[in-house]
Image (cartoon, rainbow, N blue to C red):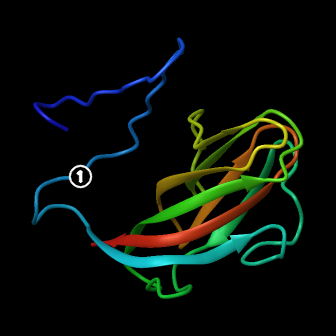
Amino acid sequence: VVNGRVSFYNNAAGLDLIADITGYFTSVGEGASHVNLGPKRVMDTRTGLGVPKAPLGAKGVVTLQVAGVDGVPAEGVTAVVLNVTAANVTGTSYVSVYPDGTTRTSASNLNVVKGQVVPNLVIVPVVNGRVSFYNNAAGLDLIADITGYFRK
């Protein structure tokens, strides 16, 4: 952010652009601090790691315990940084990652079409030690690698 603004660049072809603000970082001494973990796989619906072994169907939700797992403290975690990947996609859909027990917004974190493998980095608040994943349509597998967390 420079002078309170960010810029977006499109290399070719016309497109519509949507930007959702999910949070912001403050100067040192305010808010939460970040702890890097390096990527560690914490969820994979293909193998049953962290969640049941099954593709996530249309309108499906899966919830992942992150607090107290794989180097993340059991208490004091305010958000996690996840690289979320959709694979084995059977049609057009979107995935939203959101705090457990809260109302999901209409914002998407991944937008996919049949046959794609799509990753995206997500910073999501942690509530009840967990985060939830919503799949709007079609079927897909979800993989999540944790790269860090925020703590107070």
Residue 3 position (above or below residue 149) = above
| 83 relative position to 33: left or right | right
Instruction: Indicate the position of residue 10 as horizontal and vertical percent values.
Output: 43, 23
Instruction: Indicate the position of residue 24 as horizontal and vertical percent values.
Output: 28, 47
Instruction: Indicate the position of residue 67 as horizontal and vertical percent values.
Output: 52, 79
Q: Which residue is mark 1?
A: 25
| 96 relative position to 138: left or right | left
Figure quadrant of residue 15: top right
Residue pictured at 45% horizontal, 24% vertical: 11
Report whether residue 94 is seen.
Answer: yes
Q: Quadrant of the C terminus?
A: bottom left
Residue lying farthest to the front in this orientation: 12
Instruction: Indicate the position of residue 36 as horizontal and vertical percent values.
Output: 36, 76
Residue lying farthest to the top in this orientation: 14
Residue 102 position (above or below residue 44) = above
Q: Amino acid at mark 1?
A: Phe
